[in-house]
Structure formats: C-alpha cells, structure tokens
Image: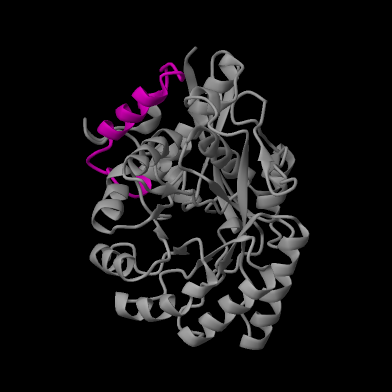
C-alpha cells in the first residue's frame, strides 16, 4: 500500500466571532489517500489556512522539504518512521510550532489508515487497552457578560452536567482581568457547592496570572474546593513560575495545551514541575508523539489529560489515546448541548456520547469515525 494524496480541507462557520474563546468555529481536516482505496483523516487545532500552506509548501533544500513530497509513495503503515522523516525533513522551518501541528494531523490520519487496513481500532495498535471505558470531563464555559449573569449561567451549567450524569467537569474561567481574583474564588466555590463533593471538579483560568505570587494567593483560597487540577494558571513559558506555584499549593497544576513535541513537554514537567501534562493530540504532534509524552509523564509519576477543543475527530483521537495509556484518566469533552457548534456536533459520524459518565471503547477499525461530507462541503473555506 502506498500514499497517493495528502489533502488539507479548511472548514469554518459562516459567522465567526474573533473575540470569542471558541476554537470550534473553524478546523482543518487532513485526508490521506492510498492506492488501496483506504483514506485516513486527521485534525489539528491550528489556523486552517496556515496548516494547508505548510502541507502544500514546496521543497527548498534538504532540511526544508515538502511534506507532501516526503509522503507520496510511502507506505502509510510506517507511521513512526514517517513522523521522524517529516521532522528531520523540516527542521529548518519546523522543529516546533505550526509544522509540528501539521504533522500531528498527518499522524492521526496515518493511524486511522493503519487501523482500517488491519481491521482493528487504533488503541489496539498503540499497545492495547488499559481500561474498558474512557471517562470524559464536561468542559464548559459560562457566557461572559455581567458578573451576575455569569454566576447564573455557571450554576445552570453545573446543574446540567449533573443531569447528564458526567463524572467530572471543568469550569472554564477565561476572563482575563474582567473579574477580580476574589470574583473567581466566589464563582468556583459556588460551582463546587452546586456540584457537591462527589464529582471530580477542575478549573481552567486561561493564563490568568503574570506571576506566581498572584496565583498562589488565589489557589490557596480554593484548596477547600478539592480541585482535581488548575489549568494554565501562568504563561506557558514561565517555567520557573510554574515550579514555584506547584511547590506552594496542594492543588495539582496542569498545562501544555499549546506545546509542540515531547521536548516542550519535558520542559514543563522537569523544570516547570507541573503535575498534569495536557498535550493537544494534534498540536503536540499526533498520537505517536502524545504516546511518547504520556510515557515520559508516567515515568515521572505524573498524569496526562489531553486538551481537546475541536470536532468529534479530536474526541475520537482522545478516546484511543486514553484507552492505550495507563496515566490518562480523563479526556476533555466539549458538550454539544452546552456549546452549540456544527463543527463539534455534526462534522463527524458517529458522535461519541457518554452514557452514565463513560464512553465505551469503540470497536470499529481505525479511529472509528467518518466525515460528514455534506456538512464539510457547507463549511469549506478558502482565502478568497
């Protein structure tokens, strides 16, 4: 079997709010076709047109090669060898950032092909299942308006996830300096009272603090809430600040949604001392690289919970990742009922829906999902 085509398909909703904290307004689907008629799909949380440009860029010299040229004619089952080939062939223009993100979408598509070709779900090819089901946490973001409205909406969302029988929830508090630290403390305490003590509760503050001292004061006020983790409290590059914060509080510190490659993950784990590493499967370099990151975390006694804020294709990748990794207890799950988006709810079939707070492992070969071609045609986006 040989690769015959690599295609990037940018998709975007018609009305985009550039001020919204909503990554599900656009995406890019990467398709890889083979001479056996098997097609694989990948996705990445990055600028769709930029990913397309990366994949279509021509070769310049031996350290700046065309990704398409490097893949055409290759055996798609050589997934990890092809990862290394792309990485070495783009080190002049890549190594981190957008090129790694584009490689991540390709890696997902290659694993999808491998599973389909062998008639097995991807998690079996990654080493076999470590659990019978995956636990998704409901990732919710109350609408930003007045503080009173945010409080009301927060309580409504907490009640809704309880009604839907989620076992874990993450409250997004990405408000910058709109609300004070004291406001954040009150919102979190109210949410915990609504949820009760049994459900696993996490928060994401979206790089809120510029220094560890500010973060320490607030997180100490929240230790009674028994938070599972606090996500992205500081700027990702502030490694020493992360370490000071981790040493000063008992709550787990989490981060890494922006990282590209295992080397950036190592910086956060070893120097930043985070307790939970959160690679986005596409952005970090695909399933191949995320399995390496999870293994490095496991060797250090750390947890790994993937970031995921795109379509059901990313959800599928998270499911296979968690299934095959011993230290991935939860996956992020955008709840379509609480964050309506056609990309999140209708782009992929079938959609994985939790039952009694869990998602059973898929049995279909590959990633186990297909593109809704009609929706994709409606959302296809060009720069013209």
Q: Quadrant of residue 263?
A: top left
| Image position of 240 (left or right of 123) | left
| Image position of 277 (left or right of 20) | left
Q: Is residue 180 visible?
A: no
Which of these two is toward me, 15 or 253?
A: 253
Q: Residue at x 52, y 67 (%)?
A: 226
Which of these two is toward me, 148 or 42?
A: 148
Q: Residue at x 28, y 48 (%)?
A: 266
Magenta run includes residue 95: yes
| Residue 336 percent location from the top left of the image | 71, 56
Answer above or below: position of 90 versus 10: above
Answer above or below: position of 23 versus 288: below
Answer above or below: position of 90 versus 176: above
Q: Residue at x 29, y 32 (%)?
A: 65
| Residue 281 percent location from the top left of the image | 47, 43
Q: In the rendered structure, which segment of residues is drawn in magenta?
A: 70-99
Q: Residue at x 51, y 77 (%)?
A: 175
């Amino acid at each position: 079997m040989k690769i015959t085509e690599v295609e990037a398909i940018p998709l975007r909703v018609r009305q985009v709010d550039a001020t919204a904290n909503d990554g599900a307004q656009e995406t890019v689907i990467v398709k890889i076709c083979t001479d056996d008629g098997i097609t694989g799909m990948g996705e990445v949380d990055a600028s769709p047109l930029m990913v397309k440009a990366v994949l279509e860029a021509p070769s310049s010299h031996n350290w700046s090669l065309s990704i398409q040229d490097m893949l055409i004619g290759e055996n798609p089952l050589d997934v990890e060898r092809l990862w290394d080939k792309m990485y070495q062939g783009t080190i002049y223009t890549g190594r981190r950032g957008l090129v790694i993100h584009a490689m991540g979408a390709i890696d997902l598509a290659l694993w999808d092909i491998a599973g389909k070709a062998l008639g097995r779900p991807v998690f079996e090819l990654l080493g076999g299942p470590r659990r019978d089901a995956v636990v998704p946490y409901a990732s919710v973001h109350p609408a930003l308006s007045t503080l009173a409205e945010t409080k009301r909406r927060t309580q409504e969302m907490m009640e809704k996830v309880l009604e839907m029988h989620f076992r874990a929830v993450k409250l997004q508090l990405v408000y910058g300096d709109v609300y004070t630290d004291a406001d954040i403390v009150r919102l979190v305490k109210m949410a915990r009272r609504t949820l009760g003590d049994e459900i696993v509760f996490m928060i994401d503050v979206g790089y809120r603090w510029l220094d560890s001292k500010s973060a320490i004061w607030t997180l100490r006020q929240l230790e009674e809430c028994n938070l599972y983790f606090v996500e992205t409290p500081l700027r990702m590059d502030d490694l020493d600040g992360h370490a000071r914060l981790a040493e000063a509080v008992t709550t787990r510190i989490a981060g890494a949604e922006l990282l590209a490659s295992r080397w950036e993950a190592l910086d956060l784990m070893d120097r930043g001392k985070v307790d939970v590493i959160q690679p986005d499967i596409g952005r970090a370099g695909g399933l191949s690289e995320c399995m390496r990151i999870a293994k490095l975390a496991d060797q250090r006694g750390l947890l790994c919970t993937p970031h995921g804020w795109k379509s059901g294709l990313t959800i599928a990748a998270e499911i296979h990742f968690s299934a095959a990794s011993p230290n991935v207890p939860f996956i992020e799950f955008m709840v379509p009922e609480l964050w309506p988006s056609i990309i999140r709810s209708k782009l992929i079939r079938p959609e994985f829906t939790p039952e009694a707070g869990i998602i059973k492992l898929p049995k279909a070969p590959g990633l186990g999902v297909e593109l809704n071609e009609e929706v994709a045609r409606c959302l296809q986006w060009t720069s013209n």
